[in-house]
Image (cartoon, helix red, strand yellow):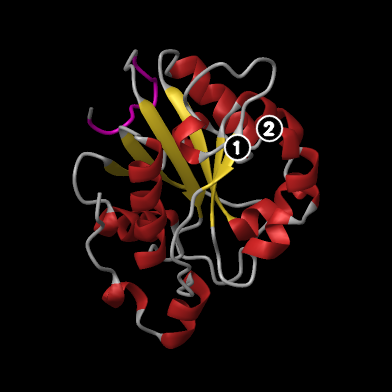
C-alpha cells in the first residue's frame, strides 16, 4: 500500500494510527504497533510523528526531521509506516487529524492506538468524546498506568462500548465506536529515559511488523 500521501487515496484498508512525538522512537513503539497489527488484524500501522504535541513542552523536543528519521528506523516493512502527515495536513489536534484523514481516505477504516497513559489523560484532549464516538480505539498497557486508566474517567464514560480486541472491527456498532484493551507485555522503555541516558537512537531494534 505504500506510504500515505498528503492528499489521500481510495485504499480499502484497516489502518492503526499511533501518534506521538517520537522523541525519539524506540522499541516500545515497535512493540505497541506489532501487538496492534496482530491482535486487530490490521493492514498497516502508521507512526504519525507530530509536528508539535499541544500537551507537551517544546523544551527538549528534537526537530521534526530528526524525530521522523528515528520513527523510520523502526518502521521496517510495508505494514509499519512512519509519516509526518499532520505537517502537510496542517493539523495538531487528534480530532482535526482524524477528520482530515477520513476525508482523504474515505474507504479506509482507522483505529486510534493509545498507550494506557494516554487513556488516563484522554479527557484533556480536545473533543475527546467525539473522537471516541467516531473512531475505534485500541489501548495498550503501560507500566504504572494500566490500572489507573481502566479506573479513570474515560474508561468509566466509555464502559458500555468496550469490546474484546477481536470484536473491535467486527462491525455492528451503532451510534458509537467501540474500544478495547489489547493484552500485551508492559515495556518500561520511554523516550524520556532514552534522552536522559544519552543513547539516542542507538537502542532501536527492528520492528516485528
Q: Which residues are magenta?
A: 2-9
- Residue ID for mark 1: 179
**85, above or below 150, in the image:** above
Between the residue at mark 2 and the residue at mark 1, the CA separation in whole angstroms equals: 6 Å
Q: Residues within 10 Å of mark 2 (few under 14, many from 20)?
A: some
Q: Residue at x 48, y 72 (%)?
A: 190
Taking 99 as reference, is 130 left or right? right
Q: Position of residue 12 (x, y in %)?
A: 33, 17
Reply yes or no: does residue 1 show up in magenta.
no
**88, above or below 38, in the image:** above
Q: Position of residue 111 (x, y in %)?
A: 49, 34
Q: Position of residue 19 (x, y in %)?
A: 50, 47
Which badge, 2 or 1, is on the more N-terminal residue? 2
Quarter where residue 37 is shown: top left
The N terminus is located in which quarter? top left
Secondary structure beneath label 1: strand
Q: Residue at x 68, y 32 (%)?
A: 161
**18, above or below 128, in the image:** below
Q: Residue furthest bottom?
A: 197
CB within 8 Å, label 2 to label 1? yes
Taking 153 as reference, is 176 left or right? left
- Residue ID for mark 2: 161
**17, above or below 31, in the image:** above
Secondary structure beneath label 2: helix
Q: Residue at x 33, y 30 (%)?
A: 4
Amino acid at each position: 500500500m505504500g506510504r500515505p500521501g498528503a492528499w489521500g487515496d481510495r485504499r480499502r484498508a484497516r489502518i492503526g494510527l499511533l501518534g506521538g512525538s517520537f522523541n525519539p522512537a524506540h522499541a516500545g513503539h515497535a512493540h505497541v504497533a506489532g501487538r496492534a497489527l496482530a491482535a486487530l488484524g490490521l493492514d498497516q500501522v502508521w507512526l504519525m510523528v507530530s509536528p508539535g504535541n499541544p500537551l507537551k513542552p517544546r523544551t527538549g523536543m528534537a526537530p521534526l526531521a530528526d524525530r521522523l528519521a528515528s520513527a523510520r528506523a523502526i518502521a521496517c516493512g510495508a505494514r509499519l509506516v512512519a509519516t509526518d502527515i499532520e505537517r502537510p495536513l496542517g493539523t495538531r489536534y487528534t480530532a482535526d487529524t482524524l477528520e482530515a484523514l477520513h476525508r482523504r481516505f474515505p474507504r479506509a477504516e482507522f483505529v486510534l492506538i493509545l498507550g494506557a497513559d494516554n487513556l488516563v489523560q484522554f479527557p484533556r484532549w480536545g473533543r475527546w468524546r467525539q473522537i471516541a464516538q467516531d473512531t475505534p480505539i485500541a489501548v495498550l498497557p503501560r507500566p504504572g498506568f494500566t490500572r489507573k486508566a481502566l479506573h479513570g474517567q474515560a474508561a468509566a464514560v466509555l464502559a458500555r462500548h468496550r469490546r474484546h480486541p477481536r470484536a473491535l472491527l467486527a462491525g455492528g456498532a451503532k451510534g458509537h465506536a467501540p474500544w478495547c484493551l489489547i493484552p500485551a507485555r508492559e515495556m518500561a522503555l520511554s523516550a524520556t529515559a532514552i534522552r536522559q541516558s544519552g543513547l539516542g537512537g542507538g537502542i532501536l531494534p527492528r520492528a516485528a511488523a
